[in-house]
Image: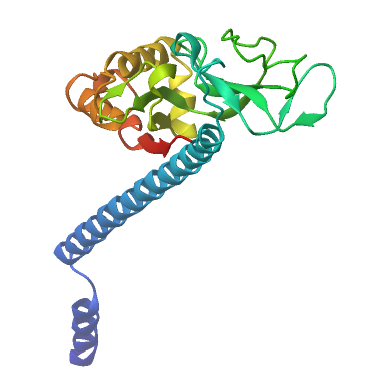
Amino acid sequence: MSRCIDIFRHRRAAAFTLIELLVATAVLALISVVLAQMLSATSQTWLTGQAKVNNFTKGRAMMDLLTRDLQGGVYRKDLPAFPGQTVAFFTERPGFGGSASTTRNLSWVQYDLGATTNTILQRADLAQDWNASASPAFGVTNAPTGAIARDTAPGVVGFQIQFVYADGSMSTSYAATNRPKAASVGIAVVDDKTLERLALTPEKISALRNGFASHSTGTNSIKADWEQYLKNDLDWSAYPQSLASGLKIFERYVSLP
């Protein structure tokens, strides 16, 4: 009889008590919460990294394209360049023109963001011939027409070009009689995921674009002006949370020939 009692007591001693089970459950819950937080942080870091890669890829591609055009530009007093402050000029790069698809080593190019709800920077080009009977005609400063527009990359919500003159001054106006030494190019880009969210409310795209356009002084660094706008004047609460990490400003100074 005493032997049976001893076995029973031994079995009871080997079991978990209610308090032990509650402690184990609490520890397991705590570990689950920590793991969930770590997974969430890792996922957010991954998404942020993807957004940065997406932005840098688009921003660098567009900057390189603009740089090649600007550095190959033909800036003469007797030829049009940046008429009416539009980003348009002759460049020694191939372009397509007329009904033929043959390329020429000279073209009229133009960059434009279009309507205020648009986020795709377009590049239009029109091939030209170097001869007396065809365009460009020296002495004629009217811009050619008929350039064929093509999309570059989506997600552009700010685009600005201004000029740096020999005395160090900056202006958005191009003076053919006092050719600038360099051009400053500014582009504000959002990543594709954030762009999908912004596309649901076109008025927010318009407000964002107008904000970048109105906060560019033309006499200061484009990037500095835009960063000041984002810091002090943009209502972040009206936009998707991903805009904070999905918006990138690029600026590049390009020497002109």
Q: Could you say which is closer to the camera, residue 83 or residue 62?
A: 83
Q: Position of residue 18 (x, y in %)?
A: 18, 62
**As drawn, which residue projects farthest toward the bottom?**
3
Q: Could you say which is closer to the camera, residue 220 or residue 189?
A: 220
Q: Position of residue 184 (x, y in %)?
A: 37, 31
- In the rendered structure, the answer to whether residue 214 lies left or right of residue 110 reads left
Vertical side of 14 occupied by 60: above or below: above
Which residue is at 75% across, 23% downward? 129
Q: Which colour scheme appears in the figure?
A: rainbow
Q: Position of residue 92 (x, y in %)?
A: 63, 33
Which residue is at 14% across, 63% downward? 19
Q: Quadrant of residue 186?
A: top left
Q: How many marks?
A: 0
- In the rendered structure, the answer to whether residue 29 lies left or right of residue 163 reads left
Instruction: Specify the quadrant that holds the N terminus.
Output: bottom left
Which residue is at 51% across, 35% downward? 62
**As drawn, which residue projects farthest toward the left?**
19
Q: Position of residue 17 (x, y in %)?
A: 18, 67
Q: Quadrant of residue 80?
A: top right
Which residue is at 30% across, 33% downward? 244
Q: Could you say which is closer to the camera, residue 220 or residue 91?
A: 91
